[in-house]
Amino acid sequence: MAQYTMTRGRYMRIGAEFDGDGVNFAVFSEHATGIDLCLFSPDGARELARLPLPERTGYVWHGRVPGLVPGQLYGYRAHGPYAPEQGHRFNPHKLLLDPYAKRITGHPRWSEALYGYNTAAKSQDLTFNTRDSARFMPKCVVEDPSFHWGNDRPPAHTIAQSVIYEAHVKGYTALRDVHHAGHFLALASDEAVDHLLDLGVTAIELLPVQAFLNDRFLVDRNLTNYWGYQPIGYFAPEPRYMSTGQIAEFQHVVKRLHAAGIEVILDVVYNHTGEGSELGPTLSFRGLDNRSYYRLVADNPRHCINDTGCGNTLNLDHPMVLRMVMDSLRYWVEAMHVDGFRFDLASTLARDDNGFQPNGAFFAAIRQDPVLSRVKLIAEPWDIGPGGYQLGAYPHPFLEWNDKFRDGVRRFWRGDDGLARDLATRITGSAEQFDHSGRSATSSVNFISAHDGMTLRDLVSYSRKHNEANKEANHDGHGEDFCDNMGHEGPTDDPAISAARAQRSRNMLATTLLSQGTPMLLAGDEIGHTQKGNNNTYCQDNELTWLDWSRADRGLMAFTRKLIAFRTAHPILRQKRFLHSRPRDADGTDDLIWWHPSGRRMTPEDWQDPELANVCVEFRTASGTPEYDDLEYAIFVIFNAGSELHVALPHPPEGQIWSRHINTAEPEAPPQTLAAIVHVPAHSVSALVLEGPG
């Protein structure tokens, strides 16, 4: 063991912090009796020193080592009781990752040594495993996160301007002919950025990029954790996405995207960690203080509460665990310059012993935070815990993924009976869920497909899931995608089926981008990407999930671009205020009118017709909108899931005309001036604009 000097250090800033001529180490543990700092050789193979942290202030253990510089490898060992029945699982034979580590060298190599107990014993986790885990563990790295940002500025698009593009770092870039394909730096390539600009999206929402685990059961099956929803480091970028191992790679990507006007939103997982249940490995949080970091069963703290389906639940009721989450979020905003977050299984974050609390500690902390209250915040509003489905219950300024939009739109275009009325609710921002507590119509994140579930192409090509590649006997994944193969399961050479599938794809894209709310597209949907019917590709890091740009559907991509440009050009489609058929101050006309194809207004009896297969809607600027936002007259949209229609148009004011700009049956058609009656092809969407001649 080498000789190092250890001094008092400071407790205020948790983590490993380089101060110019040494490194201060601070780590939280309420129940430990001692914490050792372990320093390693540059290759991580040799433990050079094991230094007990000399000070404890409150529950923060700390010390400073003069002479250390960025690049130093380290980890911790924690001493304390091994008493699973009391929730304690301290084991100094296990090397532990620093929860605040800004870089991690790689991933654990699966071994029995990673477990705090003897896995072969009958009593399992009640036993004590003395095997040292250091050689199987990645190491933490001391980092200086400073970066030359120059004149970097967040694009700061308003929510109303936003079109979100959900993408996977590797999936989006692995098959591009660029340097560092499949890694962070590929996101900064001209090809990757130009595609986002060409589409017209305003933000890229990245699947988890915080360091995550390759689950042992996947490794045993020769699979891998592709999506990344098993975090083990909330401050560290995922090592597999770094080409040189420098965190500056991610910072460079953000700077490059910002320069192009593209925001960066991170999908983050603060509801659980990759350590799993009480039978999982001891890698970090469990070994540092299992009882503090995790929610445990009250009358049997040997067991974790599992509201996430992943084995454990982070204990945000503990102020120091909540602080870790808040510090992590601020770090990604302040040091990495990201523009917002999408919170996985967000209901877990708001649950305490009394259930879901929309004004609980986590949401209160974010909403008052001077940094985090200013970025985009998106909730996945459900989990599997008690009272977990909470669509519409989140406080401002959170947006929410709207699965009712997803499912309702899929079913309408599949031809299910009685879905017209539901579609009317979805295209107007799902007011029954979101119009309360001062929330905006943009609160609903509208999407047809996301990473979890079938792609757009597969929704029209398959009638059931095909997850055999996951090696779970096709039992995993959603049981109901509301998909439809349209006459043949999987790929087909039948031109009629292919044409019908293409048109339905355009219909669903058009519905997403012509609705009130905030649209989100799944990367690859615009080019016709297929996952061969697999609706749960969490473990498929291969050509099944990587976007094949050489086979891109150029026509679909052009139509998607056209839809986004149309939405961008028409503020009526992206209003902050809800539309409730109320008279407008400007001219007394209603801000929302539902039309019957015959030219009269819809009646309650019309809406009750189970065979109603069309929705004709006139959008106007919302009642109560200030004059400075009243920018155009009206947009008339016809969603027709039935046979062809002839729709009588509202009589235009003198000096104005109706012009059709979008027709999913003729995606390349230029704008067309219309007479009093418009022909609407079967199974199509038309969008008309009230405008002056020329």
Image (cartoon, rainbow, N blue to C red):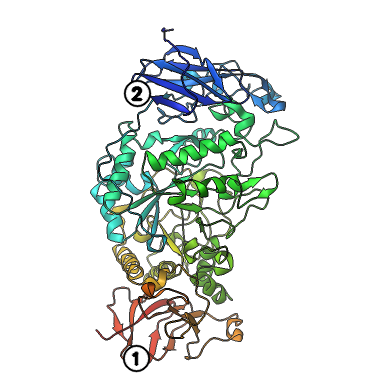
* Frontmost residue, 22 versus 238: 22
User: Residue at point 35% right, 29% down?
Assistant: 144
Question: On the picture, is 353 further left or further right than 141?
Answer: right
Please name the amino acid that badge 2 sits on.
Pro
Q: Residue 103: where, in percent of width, then height?
A: 40, 30
Q: Residue 310: where, in percent of width, then height?
A: 59, 41
Residue 214 appears anywhere in the view: no
Vertical relation: 491 (above or below) 366: below
Vertical relation: 327 (above or below) 688: above
Q: Which residue is mark 2?
A: 70
* Frontmost residue, 167 versus 603: 603
* Frontmost residue, 600 versus 152: 152
Q: Secondary structure at mark 2?
A: loop
Local crowd size for mark 1, using a 10 Å CA cut-off: few (<14), some (14–19), many (≥20): few
User: Residue at point 41% right, 71% down?
Assistant: 573
Q: Which residue is mark 1?
A: 675
Which of disc 1 and disc 2 is earlier in sequence?
Answer: 2
Q: CA distance from mark 2 to mark 1?
A: 71 Å
Extreme right residue here? 299
Local crowd size for mark 2, using a 10 Å CA cut-off: few (<14), some (14–19), many (≥20): some
